[in-house]
Image (cartoon, rainbow, N blue to C red):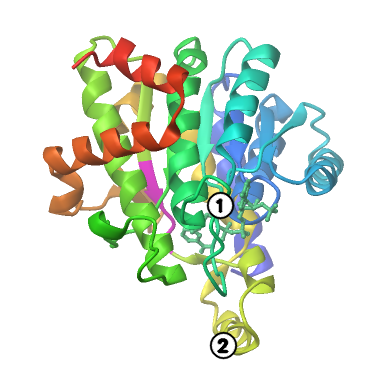
Amino acid sequence: MDRLTLEAVWAILFLSVQDKEAAEMKVLVTGGTNGMGKGVAKVLAGIDDQIHEIIILCRSKERGEATIKEIKADTKNQKISMVLCDLAKLSDVRNVINEIHRQHEYLDGLFINAGLGYAARRVETEDGMDPHFQVNYLSQFMLTLNLLDLLEKSENGGRVIFNVTEGGEIFWDDMQMKKKWGYENGIHQAMVAKRMFYVHLHDLYGKIGDPKVSFLGFQIAQTVWSNQINIIPFFMKAMASVMRFFGTFISIEECGMIMTPLFTEEREASLNRSGKFITWKKGAFIEIAEDKDVLDKAMQEKLWKISLDLCKDDKTTQIAEKYWPD
Ligand SMILES: NC(=O)c1ccc[n+]([C@@H]2O[C@H](COP(=O)([O-])OP(=O)(O)OC[C@H]3O[C@@H](n4cnc5c(N)ncnc54)[C@H](OP(=O)(O)O)[C@@H]3O)[C@@H](O)[C@H]2O)c1
């Protein structure tokens, strides 16, 4: 996108959000130090007279501090903070859940975004799992369930946006990919798991009546020029550079501009989207037809039970039992 178009999008976004009084949103972004997460954090921090508060969940103190400094300088919004958590460690996830509860009485939004992308080989986590499965899915399954109470306290309607893509499958007999590993399969398995999770969560949550939180999946329609470029091997980087020249990629800020309305829209609009898988094309959010496996209730339940077992966390199990006793 050229600079003029970019400025036009900014102007439209700016005018649309200036139309009505924006509600002040407090949003937690996982993986806010780079890529799509950083794009969303930056744009959210800059719009609506900088009223929104952003909390970045990250694994590196240095990268977290550098990101906060950059966003504060770019947007003049001072309400940017971070919490530390390596999503490859379930003990860290438990600690950060406790820390978020100590620091915050409510949350309005949660962006389930952090993800491991390219990897040259499988490096098992200290919890004995495939890293893509644990970082991209399981740890954020646990985080989401444990933050529901704070999201329910939102006066603007809590919402959880999952960064997901189409396709993929669950390798039921080798979920931790010990027998056959491939980073792409790992990424896609985690994507399907996330989609099954929010669809199931939406169904279960709807049953308790008067839902206060919405859960939706968002797929970015164009590839985002993210930190992955610095991680992938040389030949892939060369290919990406050629593709960039032909306009295949969008910037993290453009990604943020596209996604921001999902975090700031009114409660009813967000609740109406709950359970849906959407993308943004030709200036509008549109629904994507979901795979039948993802919608399969037996599979959703199977994954839900496996995930609870793998979390090995009493509090997470209690939350699941409190909301959904069966
Ligand atoms: N780029 C795209 O076009 C695209 C399209 C669709 C979906 N996605 C998905 O979007 C998500 C983000 O991708 P991206 O392209 O924005 O990648 P990215 O630039 O590499 O950003 C990934 C983010 O996740 C964080 N992260 C990775 N491992 C972590 C861990 N163990 N604990 C805590 N945080 C961790 C990274 O932190 P560090 O800064 O510490 O590395 C970084 O902030 C991924 O799930 C990806 O599959 C990307």
Query: From mark 2 to mark 1, how far is it between C-alphas?
Result: 31 Å
Q: Is 218 a magenta residue?
A: yes
Q: Which mark is residue 125?
A: 1
Residue 199 is drawn in which quadrant?
top left
Q: At label 2, which amino acid type do we have?
A: Met
Image position of 11 with respect to 50: above or below: below
Mark with earlier residue (2, 1) = 1
Q: Quadrant of residue 203?
A: top left
Disc assigned to residue 183: none
Q: Crowding near pointer 1: few (<14 within 10 Å), some, many (20+)?
A: some
From the viewer's perspective, tell me whether residue 208 is left or right of residue 2.
left
Chain part drawn in magenta: 217-221
Camera-side mark, 2 or 1? 1
In terms of image quarters, where does ligand 1 lie?
Answer: bottom right
In the displayed structure, 240 sits above or below 142; it is below
Please tell me which residue is depicted at 43% across the width and 22% down the height of the picture: 316
Q: Which residue is mark 2?
A: 239
**Taking 279 as reference, is 83 left or right?**
right
Q: Who's the residue at 46% across and 65% down the image?
A: 222
| The C terminus, quarter of image | top left
Q: Position of residue 148 (x, y in %)?
A: 45, 19
Q: Secondary structure at mark 2?
A: helix
- Please indicate, yes or no, whether residue 275 appears anywhere in the rendered image: no
Please state the horizontal and vertical placement of residue 232, each as a whole percent of the image.
61, 76
Q: Position of residue 104 (x, y in %)?
A: 65, 14
The majority secondary structure of the magenta stretch comes to strand
